[in-house]
Each structure stands twice: as C-alpha cells, then as structure tokens.
Amino acid sequence: MDTGKEINATIACMGYGFTVKVLVNGVDIGVKGGQSESKRLFSVEHPMKKEAPPEWQARLFVLKSGENDIHIEFRKTGVETDKLTFELNLENQSEPYLSFSSTDPSGTFDKKFVL
C-alpha cells in the first residue's frame, strides 16, 4: 500500500432499495443509496487537492496514512430481497480491500482500516 501523499481508493455501493450514508474519518462522502454509486477517494495530502473544487476537497480527500475509520448507516426502503453491497478498493489491488453486504432492514457497519 502507498504510504506517501498519493493514496487513492474507490468505493462502490450497490444501494438499490436502501437509503445509505457513508462516513470516512467522520466525513460524509456523499453516498445516498437508492442506486449504484461509486466515489474516488484520495489522501488528505494528495497533490490534486489544491486543484479540486471545494466540495470535492471536503468530501473526497479524506484518507490518511495509518488508521482510518469507515461508518455505514443504512435503512431498507425497497423490497425484502434487496441487498446492500459495499466495497473499498485500493489502487493497484485486484481484490477488494474491504467489503460489506446486508439484507437487514436497517443497521450500521463500523470498521477501522490501515493504509
């Protein structure tokens, strides 16, 4: 894993039939649920941060070297068979670094991870 300033990751959330909120290191990254969503996340010290729009700076430049936290809140709004899936993928890795799925009517998922 990259321990420098250029940490890059993507999240993918299949949230059909759910309302979803995802916080990374306490920051709401803008996942809402009800659809398929993906976001690219960067380190707080990434060189591209200066060039990014202010909203992106606040929501997408949230990763840090060392320990990070992810918090997912969800509530089912669709049918019983709907399934929420979430993955965190790191640049240059073929397998998801972190994954979570649920068919529960509501809940939370909390995980610490190290970059």
Image (cartoon, rainbow, N blue to C red):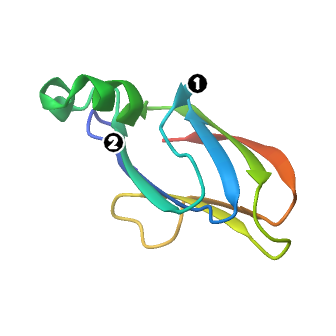
Residue at numbered disc 2: 7
Q: Position of residue 78 (x, y in %)?
A: 76, 65
Q: Residues within 10 Å of mark 2 (few under 14, many from 20)?
A: many
Height in image: 6 above or below 57?
below
113 or 10: which is nearer to us?
A: 10
Q: Amino acid at mark 1?
A: Gly
67 or 87: which is nearer to us?
A: 87
- Residue at x 53%, y 31% (from the top left corner): 28
86 or 30: which is nearer to us?
A: 30
Extreme residue toward the front, this view: 78
Nearer the observer, disc 1 or disc 2? 1
User: Helix, strand, or loop for circle 1?
Assistant: loop
Q: Quadrant of residue 51?
A: top left
- Residue at x 87%, y 60% (from the top left corner): 104
38 or 64: which is nearer to us?
A: 38
- Residue at x 70%, y 57% (from the top left corner): 18
Task: Indicate left or right for 4 with 28 as reference.
Answer: left
Distance from the alpha carbon under mark 1 to that under mark 2: 18 Å
Q: Quadrant of residue 3?
A: top left
Q: Amino acid at mark 2?
A: Ile
Height in image: 10 above or below 21?
below
Q: Residues within 10 Å of mark 1 (few under 14, many from 20)?
A: few
Report if the CB atoms under discs 1 and 2 are less than 8 Å apart: no
Q: Position of residue 84 (x, y in %)?
A: 70, 64
Which sits earlier in the primary sequence, circle 1 or circle 2?
A: 2
Q: Position of residue 4 (x, y in %)?
A: 29, 35
User: Helix, strand, or loop for circle 2?
Assistant: loop
Task: Indicate left or right for 49 with 81 as reference.
Answer: left
Residue at numbered disc 1: 26
